[in-house]
Structure formats: structure tokens, C-alpha cells
Amino acid sequence: MDNFSTFESSEKQRIEEKNKREKQWLNWGPYLSERQWGTVREDYSANGDAWNYLSHDDARSRTYRWGEDGLAGISDRLCNICLSVALWNGKDPILKERLYGLSNNQGNHGEDVKELYYYLDNTPTHAYMKYLYKYPQNEFPYQLLEQTNAERGLHDPEFELIETGIFDQNAYFDIQIEYAKASENDIFMKITATNQGDETAPLTLLPTLLLRNYWSFIEIDKKPEIILESDNQNHFVRIEHESLGTYYLYFDRALHHLFTENETNDEKIHCHPNDHPFKKDLFHTAVISGDISLPTQRKHGTKFAPMYQFDIEAKSSKTIFLRLSNQKQNQPFIHCENLFLQRAKECDDFYRDILKPKSEELFYIQKQALSGLLWSKQYYYFDVEKWLEGDPKQPQPPKQRWQGRNAHWQTLRNHDILLMPDKWEYPWYASWDSAFHCVSMAMIDSQFAKEQLLLFTKEWYMKPNGQIPAYEWNFSDVNPPVQPWATVMIYLIDKKQTGKADIAFLKRMFNKLTVNFTWWVNRLDRTENNVFEGGFLGLDNIGIFDRSQGIPGVKVLEQVDGTAWMALYCLSMLKISLEISKEDESYEEMATKYFGHFIHIAKALNHMNEENKGIWDENDGFFYDKIIFHDGNSKLVKVRSVVGMLALIAVLYIDKETLDRLPRFKNSFSWFKKHRMNKLKHPIIQTQASDDGILLSLVPKNRIAKLIRTLINEKEFLSDYGIRSLSKVYENPFSVPLEGNNYQIAYDPAESTSHLFGGNSNWRGPIWFPINYILIDALRELSHFYDDTKFEFPTGNSQNQLNFKEISNEISKRLIRIFEKDKQENRPVNLLHQDLYQREAFKHLILFYEYFHGDNGRGVGASHQTGWTALVANLIEELYN
């Protein structure tokens, strides 16, 4: 097993082996969370205070129930064996075992990681992965970060690690962690520490092997164990695990071998005496105090680290190797350098073959975005019923929880590898985020993308009534139902790549989504007029009201976006059923069903209620939300946000070839055209003179034109870096007096100045990739029918006339520009820290933020949101290829 030449293969070949289930290349991956503390699933408090129940300070001493976390770590797909890195610079008050950040209560804009780290490389089979962490040589400014952010308010920017000055003199280490697989269950780890400073600096390095603790919660037959072994030439430990069998971790000769148990320090956490001294935080205590006598006494445990201490000279590096394998090795590190070179080259070759780059700059943006997406895979375990009941070997949880958060989700049992929005800031799934993640994932691993999307329709996710869980803070919240749209996108990407139509995937999604559609219709159309209302729909604080709460004096808030999302749902299901019907004609009747649903919704949005007053304002040329009072009176809420633009996304072009292949659907449409079309006051169905095809659009042509002119107006929505979420006209705030309250909204292009929804995201001005992407997709769909229609771009520039497709391309270019270097070698995303990113060790590094400043494109919010900001890779692909 020592000669790697037998394992040479391209990444494409490995993906094929994975897809055919010939080899289990996904047994191991970057599945270790970057923050398990402060999550709902670890919260057993009576009042649901997840952030304080298990804090960052507790994390090193307290055992987790539902997962593990670590720095630059990997695990098996059930997170039983975890491998990560711990560091100490000789000055910090704590051992760096996990990324540090502020909780939602501590940050002036909510939770925020206060570290510098980058996802550099990753492939779909995780045969090669590379991660970079920048570790200061001087004492990490924990207190300064906490105190300064506490002193700042909503109108101040966040105080970041860079701003403490800790990197000013380059007194830091680049800690580069690489993984390379020799086979499915044989993984090498390479850690390279480079001193970027001008003086020799000490570094203590502890590659850490951890076994996830379940024995403290449930009865088991045999506790897993790590045991120190050695032979004449190798240094290694043996891992015995009842689920995984025997594994070995080989490592370069170390100064010391540290052992302890992955068990809670009861003395610190619960003020109870410990049953033994070998607790989870022992490595921290021993390394910081300088007394390592206790952890070196033992030769076994459930947490292990070989300890390395280096004095690294200026501009020099130290490297160590480790190897985790289910096979015993005679020469564990022979040719390992060659394996890393080979896997790194295969990684680069894979991306060049898939992406066919137009330029090195664009290639690097795409590669880092997609690598970040792959690094965002995480083991997610949450059984709500068990969580509420508690565990046999733990105290009974407070009874109040049975009337608290997620108590009605006892059917939810998640135990999967999922794509996280951000593995530190959002280490839990959000169902609508996940749909966008899958659209990007389809570019490089369409099989995983399809399987991931299907997961959310499984009975251990979806409720029996059809509701899809939103996110763990409240599974009952309602997010935009983009799963049908994502199904279509993934299907088309996969079909283009493979040349095959995966109708089985469409059928599996369609059948479950029909159940979900029924839930939506029954849940959010209380007035039965096909205009949808309700609570939180994903765009957090975009409205003038908190849409997750009731509004005093208001009976119903009818929402443009709720209706738009449901119209898109109908058209996506229509598209899916038409595709399936090409092979299975029984689905033509379902196509007719969703066509009918769409017609009802479109009619309702464009002209509804007895006065025939809808939520369209003809003078303004805009869709607005409408509030209906208890006495039956109503009022438009005239806020020009991207919500009013979302009516554009519900559009579908059906070509003549499709119609001709589906006679039943064509006959149904022909009947409607003959007997009902003339009764539509607004032309939501357009047919071409030659009967070549039809366009279904929630918005009639004359209204589309008015919306587009507003959308591409630089004084309103169009920024140099994409489409803003709120019109810039609200630099002068807009207010609505209601029931003695004055509700106000203002253009906030960057961080939120509101506490709504935790205060850590902002839809009142910034640029968000998912909404931009779905609008761009709609513009492309419109271009199939209105190919000759042109607009001034931007509005007011009569010298530049563009059609729908050209407008979509221009918006795409503006979004991509956020990450591109300008003439001064600066990327707009790095605007606040341009000097730092001009340095040689930083200039190639890119962070993909949650959202972006509406005027200058700088990154805002979660800093590793690949995540849906990975959609920039799709935009580059669609624009240039």
C-alpha cells in the first residue's frame, strides 16, 4: 500500500467511480464544522439562549452532543474520527483549537468570526484540499476585539482583526494545511508553517485527532479508543472504533505525545468534581501552563496530539506530515511529496478542463469560489425528538422546551453531509440557501448537487404535511420556495455536461415538491385570492415591517414577493412536468395543472379584489406590498425594494418543438387560448405570430418595460457592482404612520442599522448574489421571446440600447467586477483593507462575503459565504462560455 503509482487517476475518473459507487471517495472530507458552539442543536437551556448556553469559552472544556469542530479539519462522513490543527504562539491565553469570533450578542452587527483564513483548493472527491490560516505571532487580541465591538453601535462598522494592527509588521505565521488522498480511506496531511515576519518566532503545533463523544450520552457496547504504538521506524497511534473498525495515524517524530479524553470538564462547566483529570481541555491547560506531565503520562484516550515545538527563522518554513489510513503501513511517508504534487496538479487540471478559463484572473476567482463551496460541506446531526427528550446518561432537559423552539418538528432527524452557508457564521443549513448552493455545485459535481437537493424532500426533513424545514433557529419559518427553480437549473447544467436527461431525478423531485406546493397554497393564501401573505420570506429586513411578526391594526400583509415566488414555483413545476412528459406522457396532465395555477396567480397579482385595485401602481410603474386592515380597507406600502422586482422572475418560454411533442398539453393550451385568453385584462400569455412558441409571464409586457427601466436606473437599483436590494432614492428615508407608530426605512448600503433578524444581515440596500442571479436568469428567459426589445442602459443613456440578454450580461459583469483586480491591482471586495491585500502574501487571496456594499462593492457580513456567493462561478461560466 506504499506505492502511490497504482492510485494515479484524474479527478474526473474519481468522480465517475464515486457516481457509479465503485469507490467511496466521499468517506472522508472537510466535514468538520468550524463552530459547533452557540448552535441551536447544542442548546439545552429553558429559554432557548443558544449563544450563552455553550459559548466559545466553554467549547474547549465541554463535550458536544451533536457534532465536533476544529481548525482546518476533516472527518469521516459520520464525524466519528476528526483530524484538525491546534496552535500556540507562546503568548496567547488559550490554545488555538478552533476559530474565534463574537456571538450575536457581542458583535455590533451580530455574530462575526475574527480570524483570517482562506479556502484555497478542493476537489469534488476531496482527493486534494488546501486551507490557509494566518496566525499572529503576538498575543491574539481577544479582549480588544470584544471590548471595541461592544463599544460600537449599529451605525459603526465592525472592528475586525486586521484593524487591531496585529498584521502590520508581518509578525504572523502562514499555516497552510493540505490533504491528499492516496485512496478512499488513506489520507495524508501536510502542515507547513511559514514565518512571514522579520525575526525568529516560536510556534507550538499540535495536529489533533479526536473521537466524537457519544458514550457520555447513550449506552454503548465499547468505547472507541486511540492507542499509542510504535515499531522500529514509525511513530503512530491505532484507532479502534466500533463503526469504522481500525485506523492508524502516522506522524513525523514529535517532541511529545499528548493524550486525554474528549469529555466535559465538570469542575469548570458544572462546578462538580471530575471523576478523572483527563478532560477535553487538558491540552489547553498543559500547553499554556508549560506543564505537560499529565497528558504525556497516558498512552491511550479519545483525544490525541503529537506535539511539535519550533523556532522558525524569518521567511523560513517548517513542514510536518501525517497519514490517516485504515491499512497498516511499513513506509508511511515514502513518495508522499510526489503524491501532494500529483494531487495538486490534478486539482488544477480538473478546474481548467471544467471551466475553460477566459483569463487567469477569472479562473482564479472561479476556482477559489468553487473550492470554498466544497470546503463548506459539513456533518450535520440533529434529531429533534431526542433533543427534546434528552439522553439516558444526562440530566433531564427543562420541560419548557416542549412548548419552545422546534417542538413541532419531532419528525426531523438529520444525519447528513450538507453544504453550509458559512461554516462559522451559519454552521447550519437554510433550505433556500441550499438550493442556490446546489446550483453552483452542479458545475463540478452534479450528482452531489442532485442528491443534496433531494435530501430536503426526504421524510426525515420534510414534514408529513409537506413543509420543508427552514433552519434550526426556527424550522417553521418560511423561506422562498426556490427548490423547483433549482431543480430545473441543476437538471439543465447536468444535461449540458453529460448529454443525458436525468428524468428520474426530475420525477423524484416533482412528486415530493407537489406535496410541498400544496402546503404552501394551504398555508399562505388565507384570503383564497391567489395572492400570498405571511411571515419571514428570507429577505430578512427588506420591508418597512418585520414580516415575521404581526403588525398592529393590520389583518393581512399581502406580499409581492410571496406571490412572485409561488408563480415561479408554478412555472418551474410546469417546466419540470413538460420535460418529464417528453418521456412519460402521463405527466402532461400535471403540466396543465400547474399552468392553471399560474394563470390564477398571475390574474390575481395584476388585477384583484372587488375594486379591481391590485398591488401594481400604474403611475409609479411598480409593484408594492399591500396592507389590509380589519375593517376591510387597504393601503399600498410604497417602498421601492427589490421585492417589487421579483414579479419579473416568474417567466417561462415554451418553444414550438416542446409544444408539438406534447399534444395533450398543447390542446389544453389551445382551448384556453380560444375560450379564456380574451378574458384576461392583462396579457400574461404572449404568443408569437408564427406560433413558434409562447411566453408565460407574471408581468405583462407594458409593465415589464416599466420595471426594467427602474431596475437599470443607476439612481435607483443599478450599481456599478450589481442590483441593489433597496432603491437609492431612500437616502432620504421613507416612513409610514400606522396605529400610532411611525415605521421607517432608509437606504443602508452596507451593514444593517437595525436589530431586526439579529442585526447581522441587511437587505436595505446591499447587493446579494442569489437575488441578482435569479433576476439575471429571468432576463435571459425573456430574451427568448422579446429578442428585439431594447432599453437605454443605464436608464437615461440614449446612446446605449441593449436587449434583455445584453442587460443580463452587463449585470453579470458588474457582479463579477466585485472580485476582479482594477488597474491599481485592488479588488472592490477588499476596499476597507486594500493596503493589506497589496502585500505579496495576500494579493492572491479572495473572500466571498454574504453580501456587498450597494455603492462600492466591498464585502459585508459573513466572510466565507460560499455558500451562495459561489454563484459568481456560474456567472463567469454563463457569460464567457
Image: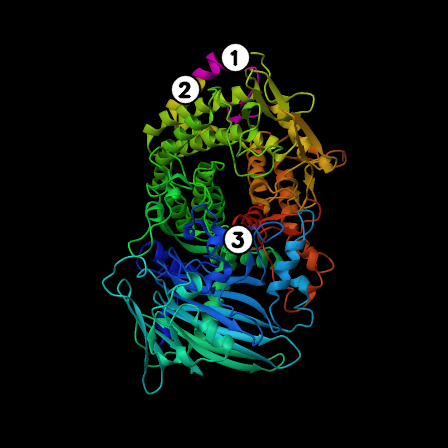
Magenta-drawn segment? 671-700
- In the image, 442 versus 153, the foreground residue is 153
**Which residue corresponds to mark 2?**
668
The picture places residue 679, in percent across and down from the top left corner, at 52, 12
**Disc assigned to residue 425:** 3
Mark nearest the camera among 3 and 2 is 3
Is residue 372 rendered to the left or right of residue 746?
left
The picture places residue 763, in percent across and down from the top left corner, at 61, 40
- In the image, 345 versus 240, the foreground residue is 240
> Which image quarter: residue 219?
bottom left
N-terminal of the pair, mark 1 or mark 2, is 2
Q: Which quadrant is home to the N terminus?
A: bottom left
> Cα distance, mark 3 to mark 2?
49 Å
**Which residue corresponds to mark 1?**
679
Mark nearest the camera among 3 and 1 is 3
Q: Residue 697 magenta-drawn?
A: yes
- In the image, 661 versus 682, the foreground residue is 682
Residue 775 versus residue 598 in the image, above or below: below
Q: Secondary structure at mark 2?
A: helix
Q: Amino acid at mark 2?
A: Ser
Residue 833 versus residue 406 in the image, above or below: below
The picture places residue 179, in percent across and down from the top left corner, at 45, 68
At label 1, counting other C-alpha atoms closer than 10 Å, the crowd grade (few under 14, some 14-19, many 20 or more) is few
- Please indicate, yes or no, whether residue 112 appears anywhere in the rendered image: yes
Is residue 439 rendered to the left or right of residue 395?
right
Are dots 1 and 2 in contact, CB under 8 Å? Answer: no
Mark nearest the camera among 1 and 2 is 1
> Which image quarter: residue 248?
bottom left
> Cα distance, mark 1 to mark 2?
16 Å
Q: Amino acid at mark 3?
A: Glu
Residue depicted at x 57% and y 32%: 646
